[in-house]
Image: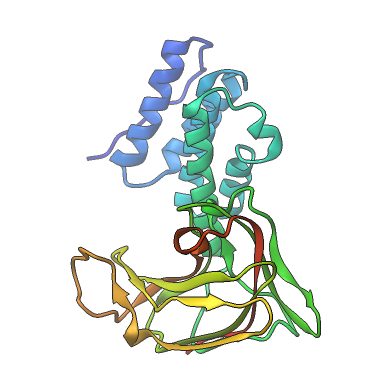
Amino acid sequence: MFLVVVVGAFAADPATDWATLYDARLAEVADGTPDNAVRLYRGLLEDVDAAQPLYAMTSFWLGRALLGAEQIDEGMRVLSSMTGESARGRLRDETDADLRLAALVLLEDGQLRLDAIGRLPARWSFETGGFPAVRGAVGDGRGEVGVRREGERIAFRWNTSVRPGEPDRVTLRFGEAAVPREVGFSARAADAEAVMRVVAVDPWGQRWFSPEWTVPTDDWLDVRVGVASFVPEEGVRGPVWLDRVIDLRFEDITGERSDVRGANALILDDVYVL
């Protein structure tokens, strides 16, 4: 089925605005491409005042449609306008807060697409460059990540805030489904012992878990783990073996495994995926 939407002048009428938003959503679904939706969302935003509840929702769907149209930079710009400190101050209710979180999830996915790893093996020593790991939406407000000097090493510092039952993560994405055999890294915690694991996500969205490790503060933990040892989450359906991976997540699960709370940091070095 194909839907043709004619865009005319947008009336400053809430009922018309909501109808236009519905038409844009329908156009995106019906014709299989986001192009009509992008055009309608842009026109609607020109007509809607930023103080209206519809503005945030339309911005979200515009950003989503732009990502779907492979206009990733522009889509991320629109979504970022919903997630900064100035946007946080405009949140009116739980609906806006939920939209902001949804925008953060899409921003994470957009950045992962931009930074996707082209092929394996891949190694990062941090002496000569950065690290394409992307902070998860769950890390919002927990601190910055980046490559910096840590004592005698240049390493990847992952600042976090340990919260009960709320894991934090950084993620590597592969441009095409990869078949990794081994993951390795060195890790040290800054202020308190941490607990971490690696999670592989397959093309079906199923998660596969590595063993868990306690990361010390006074020495470097060296990890070398075969992907064949990863186990599927309980109740997983589909393949019973892990043969393709889309995302590889480094997860801080300290808040689920210990009484440690508050600011901490994980420092990673010599990361590789074979």
Q: Residue at x 54, y 38 (%)?
A: 100
Q: Residue at x 55, y 25 (%)?
A: 55
Residue 257 or residue 202, whichever sits in front: 257
Residue 15 versus residue 78 in the image, above or below: above
Whether residue 173 appears in this view of the structure is no
Residue 194, quarter of picture: bottom right
Q: Residue at x 66, y 66 (%)?
A: 265
Q: Going by the picture, which residue comes out furthest to the front?
A: 259
Q: Quadrant of the N terminus?
A: top left
Residue 37 appears left or right of 151: left
Residue 30 appears left or right of 227: left
Residue 126 or residue 53, whichever sits in front: 126
Q: Residue at x 60, y 37 (%)?
A: 82
* x, y percent for residue 203: 32, 68
Residue 208 versus residue 37 in the image, above or below: below
Residue 47 appears left or right of 240: right
